[in-house]
Amino acid sequence: MPRLAADIVDAYLFRRVNARVQFLLLLRKPDVPMGDTWQSVHARIKPDETAFQAADRAVGEQTGLTGVDAFSADYVNQFYDHHSDTIILAPVFAFTVGARARVRLGEEYCDSAWCDREEATARLLYAGQRWAVRHIDEVIGHGGPEAELYRLR
């Protein structure tokens, strides 16, 4: 029987530029697991952290950015890891950054790109990642009363 684990988080950074929402995607180096693929920020939750604390920490470590506002995306990305026979559940968070924020790539990445919704969903491999981008864009990305329901910071 597969194992169930909820020990990782997904974080999506976005910015607003001229009333458009853009998502930050990171290109993994060719020689690391999932090499040459575009990703959002992912991290393991340390034993002394909450899921939100892990996402907040990972954003800084992997991008050098500090999120201005933070939101629960009200979504849990789920997927099956066939190597470990594990069903993975990953809470998803969204972070806004300033329009001119400068990315400092973590050691596993070789490039970054700010992408609108269509480009971001075209670059991401997995359905759960694409769904998260669409959901964040629709519910949180443009702000307003509905977005405030998900605000963490």
Image: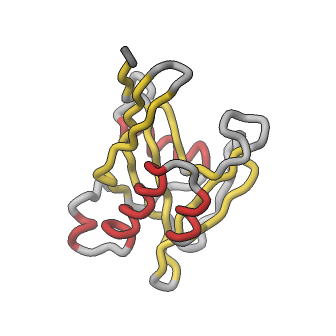
Task: Residue 58 in the image: state x and y as whole percent.
Answer: 52, 42
Task: Residue 83 in the image: state x and y as whole percent.
Answer: 56, 21
> 15 or 23: which is nearer to us?
23
Q: Is residue 83 above or below residue 38?
A: above
Q: Is residue 1 above or below residue 100?
A: above
Q: Is residue 57 above or below residue 17?
A: above
Task: Name the residue: 41% across, 64% down.
Answer: 134
Is residue 4 shown left or right of residue 42? left
Q: Quadrant of the C terminus?
A: bottom left
Task: Residue 81 in the image: state x and y as whole percent.
Answer: 50, 28
> 55 or 86: which is nearer to us?
86
Q: In the orientation shown, which residue stands out farthest toward the bottom?
A: 18
Q: Is residue 73 above or below residue 15?
A: above
> 108 or 129: which is nearer to us?
129
Give the number of callouts: 0
Task: Name the residue: 67% across, 48% down.
Answer: 37
Colouring chosen for the image of the structure: secondary structure
Task: Name the residue: 68% across, 54% down.
Answer: 104
Q: Where on the picture, by quarter, is residue 94?
A: bottom left
Task: Residue 139 in the image: state x and y as whole percent.
Answer: 31, 67
Q: Quadrant of the N terminus?
A: top left
Task: Name the residue: 52% across, 48% down.
Answer: 126
Q: In the orientation shown, which residue stands out farthest toward the right?
A: 31
